Image (cartoon, coloured by chain):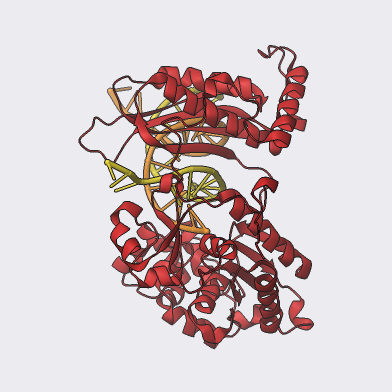
Chain colours: A red, B yellow, C orange
Amino acid sequence: MLYVIQSNVIPLCQNLEIMYALVDCNSFFCSVEKVFHSGLQGKPVCVLSSNDGCIVSLTPEAKRVGLHRGNPIFKVMDIVNRYGVRVFSSNMELYAAMSRRIVNILRQSVKHVENYSIDESFCFLDGYEKHYNLEEFMREIARKIDTWTGIPVSVGVAPSKTLAKIGSKFAKQYLGYRNVCVIDTEEKRRKALSLFDLADVWGIGRRTFERLTYLGVHTPLEFADKSESWVRRNFHKPGIQTWMELNGIPCIDTSEVVRNQSLCTSRSFGEMVSDLPSLKASVATFASSCSNKLRTQHAGAKSVMVFISSNRFREDLPQYSNAGTVTFPIATSDTLEITYAALRILQDIYHPGIKYKKSGVIVSDIEGLSCVQGDLFDPVPNRPERAKMMQSIDILNQRYGIKTVKLAVEGEEEQVWKVKRAYQSPNYLTDINEILTIQI
DNA sequence: TCTGGGGTCCTAGGACCC
DNA sequence: TCTGGGGTCCTAGGACCC
């Protein structure tokens, strides 16, 4: 076997003009809830996944009383009660609105901002060091975000994204950094890598961690110090990229893709369901949601997949899961066309006598609608007219609330398969009827 | 009783072709 | 009897992320 060896390991400090800042919101979902609920400062708070299943976000105070991300809430209710932990259902609409405000503040201060996830953004600071002290510059931005939105952030500044992420973790962990940790010298890099937990490095998941441990590597520094040929012998592209990034050579491109490659809507049900009509209602609702997402992106999908599955945690019940796909002759975002196809798939894969816990719809092969190829044998008559109808429905739903107009097969509200959200906050930022009221 | 949802990228391997 | 060596395309599944 022939390995191509690239000898392009450049000493860290030659590369300083490319600096990345990662701005990471601390316990983001919890912090948003704390903005709208006074009296929670210093208190343990956690936010749950859909169906009020697991903990997905928690404050340091909640960690200190023994809670962890991923805990099923029903297993830790004794801790919640004993320490008076405040629990919220997740409200993604509220968190997304807050996220947009934070990204806007960043874009006011930095020319090139890459919004990586709902609570993290990368800032490209190339050239900024000529005019600013990067540490003070980012500290001022962090202060601005905290003052204007109430959300505390931690910032890592370093010559690669992976190192910037490590910096932000240090900034979060140690108050002495005052929200910003800069890794800009070889000495700081080696110190940080020797102290950081290998399993917490961005790009090193459970399997890679196990493999590295097996190979006798126990800290990020030991990994970074391995020779290039050793890394190429033992890992594929992702591992090599992480190794380079740890050595200060940026090579991970997370630049925003204009359009998704696939879109998915799926839920676990509040209660298990066996009957076809309930499953149909869920699949129709999810298909309709996917069509909606496509239209907001001005895109269409060429294929739709439906999956259903039983409750994998109930070993006492018969297990079954299946999926099916339908391809369209031309890319579509038409709710009727996508839902009809989805229901046909469901009909094919449905197996009676099973208690189902989850269903979902995934649309893929997504294209921009402006460049969609026409088809001589298009099964949808009057496609332009149908598009206008969809547009009208979208306008009505936007003006009078989602689901004002929907397909009959989607069924009534409050069905057994609907998710449980017992502790949800109002949409303070996006619904005029739920705006915060202050009594003086 | 109760255990998340939504993505991306990479690789291996099969089918098929010349 | 002997039984090649390239390609491409597609899909499933693994691994990882927040």
User: Outermost residue toward the left?
Assistant: A316
Total number of numbered discs in the rendering: 0
Residue A72 visible within the image? no
User: What is the x, y in percent for residue A202?
Assistant: 49, 64
Q: Nearer the viewer, residue A373 or A58?
A: A58
User: Outermost residue toward the front?
Assistant: A440
Residue at position x 31%, y 36% from top?
A311
Q: Which image quarter is the C terminus of chain A in? A: bottom right
Q: Nearer the viewer, residue A235 or A358?
A: A358
Left or right placement of residue A305 versus residue A357 in this view: right
Quadrant of the rendered image containing residue A10: bottom right
Q: Vertically, is B7 above or below A10? A: above
User: What is the x, y in percent for residue A330?
Assistant: 66, 23
Q: Nearer the viewer, residue A240 or A377?
A: A377
Residue at position x 73%, y 19% from top?
A386
User: What is the x, y in percent for residue B5?
Assistant: 48, 43
User: What is the x, y in percent for residue A61?
Assistant: 42, 72
Q: Vertically, is A17 above or below A352? A: below
Q: Which image quarter is the N terminus of chain A in? A: bottom left
Q: Vertically, is A21 above or below A289? A: below
Residue A163 visible within the image? yes
Q: Nearer the viewer, residue A195 or A79?
A: A79
Left or right placement of residue A30 versus residue A320 in this view: right
Residue at position x 65%, y 12% from top?
A379
Quadrant of the rendered image containing residue A437: bottom right
